Amino acid sequence: MENHTIMSNSESSSEGLEADFLIHPEWLVPMSEKGLILSDHSLAILDNKIVAIGDTNSLKQSISARREIMLQNHLLMPGLINSHGHSPMALLRGFADDIPLRPWLEEKIWPAEGRWVSEEFVRDGAALAIAEMLRSGTTAFTDMYFFPDEVAKVALKANIRALLAAPVLDFPTVWAQDADEYIRKTTDLNDRYKNNNLIQVAFGPHAPYTVSDEPLRHISTLANELDIPIHIHVHENSAEIEEAVAKAGMRPLQRLNELGLLSQLLQCVHATQLQQEEIDMLAAAGVSIVHCPASNAKLASGLCQTQAILDAGINLCLGTDGAASNNELNMINEMRMAALFGKGAADKAGATSAWDVLQMATVNGARALGKEDMLGTLETGKLADCIAIDLGQINTQPVYDPVSTLVYSAQGHQVSYVWVDGKLNLEKGELTMLDSSELIANASAWAKKIG
Ligand SMILES: [Zn+2]
């Protein structure tokens, strides 16, 4: 860490504007405009907001900061938004690999969850996942899992934003007995967190093949009333489509459309199997799509047509999915995979550019959360969720274009500073609010029990 120094109690104020942090990065990428990379610019944070972005010399003169942080070789940007995952499944990392989706779920994951999932499992798994996400620059994540109250408690303790997509299924699990109970628990959860600054709630109907028509209609009505998102796995692989056509005579997205679910509140996760008319239908409805390239590749689910989706103007976001099908929760690697697979899917090297995937992981994620006015870009007045990545290491030198270097060369562990809601969560690569050695000991103890 020889390439950055910290100065305390700067006395350089001349105009009296105060800040908790005044950050001087090598490059500032605010994401307010595609292609904009600022040099000799600094950013000031007071409480949980960005209070100034501007020329370094003038901010140094006009702002009195409690901490001034020099970040040579660092790129400062908005925090990454992981738009899909199942955080407690971090405890099932590496538990079932090299198996296709349905046998993976039905023969491995669901039986293990039936045996082991509890409030304690969810707390320990979520904490491990959150630590990994913060460590690699994620400042907000969307999570679909049982006992979402427990995930919320861990997220609040760790100071990270979460959209909790509480699951809905037709069949009983350890969390609820039937669709009505899942839905009631979701609305109760929303009541508890609707005024929380860090936690949001969504309906998380698992998939069209695990939730029947009546609960889906009910969810649609309630989501509109409460103005909260619906987060669903859909068109994940070709077998899902074939089964749906055999059973209901139509493709899953057509069924969701007929049930009235397509709207700006809907987040379709995966969508690897889309016909052009389905892309047009999703675009017209204002639906968001969440692309999970590593999970799709690992389960051989198919290639998402990211460039066609972007060309249609759909809000395309990026997610890691759970650690059982990835097997990491690292949005920097996920951006790289999205860029590379997007080129393969389109058969064009210019498809799904570094800037495209950076937008997917920031502004587009914020839009899906309904918070694009407060998150996703670095602008004065917005919430202070930002990260700094150290590009001064062997694998990221030399730097011709810092965004290209970030997407195509950087590793998650090169994130060295993370602020969420104005608080410093990661400092010089060390988590400030979670105890890494305790998390590792817990995970290891779970593996001994489960394995
Ligand atoms: Zn998933």
Image (cartoon, rainbow, N blue to C red):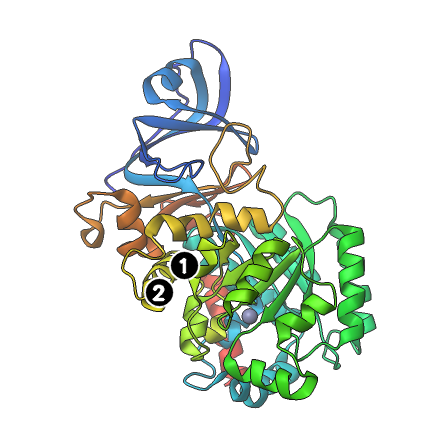
User: Looking at the image, do the residues carrying marks 2 and 1 touch, with CB atoms under 8 Å apart?
Assistant: yes
Which structural element holds mark 1? helix
Name the secondary structure under disc 2.
helix
The correct choice, above or below, for 317 with respect to 212 in the image is: above
Image quadrant occupied by the N terminus: top left
Residue 403: quadrant of the picture: top left
**Residue at horizontal 39 percent and vertical 23 percent from the top:** 54
Residue 246 x/y as whole percent: 64, 88
Q: Could you classify mark 2 by the number of other residues whose Cα lies within 10 Å: few (under 14), some (14-19), or many (20 or more)?
A: some
Residue, disc 2: 346
Is residue 378 something one can see in this rendering? yes
For ligand 1, which image quadrant applies?
bottom right
Query: What amino acid type is highlighted by mark number 1?
Result: Gln
Q: Which residue is identified by label 1?
A: 307
Distance between the alpha carbons at the discs numbered 2 and 1: 7 Å
Q: Identity of the amino acid at label 2?
A: Ala
Q: Residues within 10 Å of mark 1 (few under 14, many from 20)?
A: many
The one of 104 and 432 positioned closer to us in this rendering: 104
Q: Is residue 284 above or below residue 98?
A: above
Q: Position of residue 153 (x, y in %)?
A: 66, 56
